[in-house]
Amino acid sequence: MRIIRFEVYRAFHSRTFLVSLLIGCFICAFDMLVFCSQVENANLLKAWIGTDDLLNINPVFYVLLPVIACLPYGGSLYTDIKTGYEKNICVRASRLEYAFAKGVAVFLAAFVSVSLPLALNLFILAGIYPNYIPDTFRVLSGLRLPDRRLFAALCNAHPALYSILFICIDGIFAGAISLTSLSLSKAVKSHFTAVVTPMVIYIVSSTLLFPNDDDPVIGNWSIMDMVNPSPIVTTLWYQMLTVLFVVLIINIFFIWIFSRKRDVL
Amino acid sequence: MSEIVIEGLTKKIKGALILDNVTMTLTSGKIYGFKGKNGSGKTMLMRAISGLIISDSGKVVIDGKELHKDIPFPKSIGVLIENPAFLHQYTGVKNLKLLAGLTGKINSEEIKTALERVGLDPADKRTYRKYSLGMKEKLGIANAIMGEPDIIILDEPINALDEDTVHKIKNVLLELRDKGKLIIIACHDREELEFLSDVIYEIKDGSVVDRKDISNEDA
């Protein structure tokens, strides 16, 4: 418990955490300012960066999501190994406790750095735009989602709750993705590589897995689209759970293998 | 009170034999000096005793408990191995407080005492980033001795220090030894090592080639 508190403290007091939050907040603030200056009669669902498909800022946030997630603390194990700081820890805690605490801290820092800008954006816009339910006949109120879409009933009845649900989902995916940085720490040669590699995997896998079709196809395995709550989301719930489970299991497996019996030099 | 029993400890890294069948017994209330050329295996032996490396064969038993089998790391140990490493954005006292929080056994007063013993000011507001080489070394020693752990391991602790501080550190180590702590020290300065140590082990190519009991010689 003490080591978790120690790692979480380090994560949330790091400069990289602040930088990551600022990047996320800057993108969200920019989207909000541009939207407010261009659109008057819209509802909250249309204005929120997650579901705003009028401007092209939404994709920027979701392409950069892995960097925003990994930057705060994802490369910290690499740094601890490189500087020798881990020696101070490994004579006071077991390697597995250390790895577990690192994982918790990395996950939480990523969750907050992705969710907080999205939540702030929603919170501020809620003071500007009304929370009307989506209406098929009014484009600026956001289109009603077809019933077969993920969380369509929630979106059509309670759009703000739909946004909040996706803020949590994005945070969880960000946490899972940031663990990739941790699992790569022993294999990579620089802090930059540890932080950026998850984004490369995320973009390449999402591009390969995106259905090559002009029309949105139900059953999309692309992670980049999975975390994006905009109306083009075509993922099914079991696909989302499967991908999350696979990402978590692979990362936890590599972190465990790496931490179980290794020399601290 | 601590006893460290090392039996047939062997370690290879990338095919190179780093420790070769090392056997020794270390007891509390003594200062053990490790001497040897660069790359002889002194630091690696210290790492093995600290639980930082896992041996290929042989074992390290601390107070009857085998490392990596019964315990993952020694229960009461302070180490300074190679360069001190701390968080650059925090002051010395903050760094030590964070590390002390990992065990919960060391209070603020003990941290301040450790800093003062090595000649650092606990009220110093400078961050570790702005520390000189000597101050970093002192903080590393303070980290190793804070809370007066049963086992203290110092690898080349006086290299970057001025004469006054070396004198101060020597007194601290002798004081800790008299309190029954087991201290292991590696040092290039033969005179200093012989002054401080009760027993000196000479290490060459990963093996113990000589054991010299200084306290008996003095007697």
Image: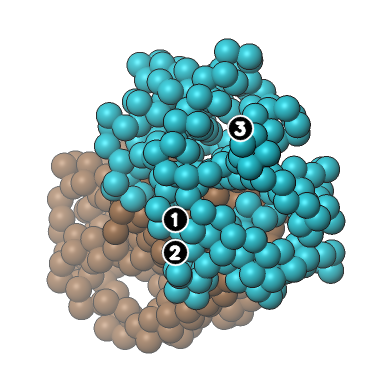
Chain colours: A brown, B cyan
Compared across the picture, whether B192 is left or right of B121 comes to right
Residue B76 % position (x, y) = 41, 52
In the image, residue B111 sits, relative to residue A56, either above or below, namely above
The amino acid marked with disc number 2 is Asp
Reading the image, the residue beneath label 3 is B196
Do badges 1 and 3 share one subunit? yes
Disc 1 element: loop
Q: Please state which of residues B12 and A233 is positioned toward the viewer in this rendering.
A: B12
Task: Give the residue at mark 2.
Answer: B63
Q: Residue at x 76, y 57 (%)?
A: B208
Q: Earlier in the sequence, mark 3 or mark 2?
A: 2
Q: Relative to A177, is B155 above or below?
A: above
Res. B2 mark: 1
The CA distance from mark 3 to mark 2 is: 24 Å
Labelled pair 2, 1 in contact (Cβ < 8 Å) = yes
Q: What residue type is labelled 1?
A: Ser
Badge 2 sits on which subunit? B
* Residue nearest the viewer, comparing A221 with B67: B67
Q: Which residue lies furthest to the front in this view?
A: B219
